[in-house]
Amino acid sequence: MIKTDRLFLRRWRDGDRADYHAICRDPEVMQFLGPPQSRAESDAALDRMITSQTEHGFCFWAVERREDAVLLGFCGLMPGKPPISGEIEIGWRLGSAFWGRGYAREAAAACIDWAWAHGLPSIAAITVPSNTRSWGLMERLGMKRVAGGDFDHPDVADGSPLKRHILYRLARPR
């Protein structure tokens, strides 16, 4: 679907489920996202991405390394859920073995290019304030933190250190 120098961003396949689950059960990967996921939880998330692709023409796509077809994780676009309903969210999640190599930035930049080529007006991203890698990437991509945009995530339990989120946005260039 989308090709970069080192990556393919593509539709999900049933054969991706075990590798995706391995990423979602890694405590380091899930540190700022919630507890490691069960196989049923990671399968349900993958099913939501497949449904989004069918319904909207985009999703958090599978990120595959071109040189060896290894699944690195995901990066892509999804319709935002509350409290960013009505926006398009960009998101990424790569296995910790693949961090620090520029894969997330390469994939996210390709997703932004795809968004602009398909007429999307803006892109939003959310994370917890302590996830410096994630919001650092947002800033390297040109995204700006929305003043007054911090919020308590409705899907996170009260009292959790992951409850508070920050919002970044990038407008389509004119």
Image (cartoon, grey):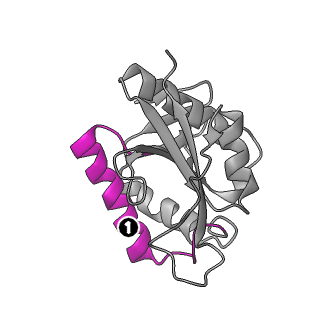
Query: Farthest residue in the top direction?
Result: 174
Residue placed most toward the observer, 157 or 99: 157
Q: Is residue 18 above or below residue 146?
A: below
- Give the residue type that dot 1 points to: Asp
Image coords of residue 65 (percent x, y): 58, 39
Q: Quadrant of the N terminus?
A: top left
Image coords of residue 143 (percent x, y): 62, 36
What are the residue bounds of the magenta stretch?
A: 32-61
Q: Is residue 169 left or right of residue 80?
A: right
- Among the 4 quarters of the image, the one containing residue 139: top right
Mark 1 burial class by Cα count in 10 Å: few <14, some 14-19, many 20+: some
| Disc 1, SS | helix
Residue at which label 1 appears: 43
Residue at point 61%, 24% (across, down): 5
Residue at point 64%, 67% (across, down): 32
Q: Is residue 90 visible?
A: yes
Q: Is residue 139 left or right of residue 38?
A: right
Q: Is residue 66 visible?
A: no
Q: Is residue 35 left or right of residue 133?
A: left
Q: Is residue 99 above or below residue 119?
A: below
Query: Farthest residue in the left direction?
Result: 55
Image coords of residue 113 (percent x, y): 50, 24
Q: Main secondary structure of the magenta part?
A: helix
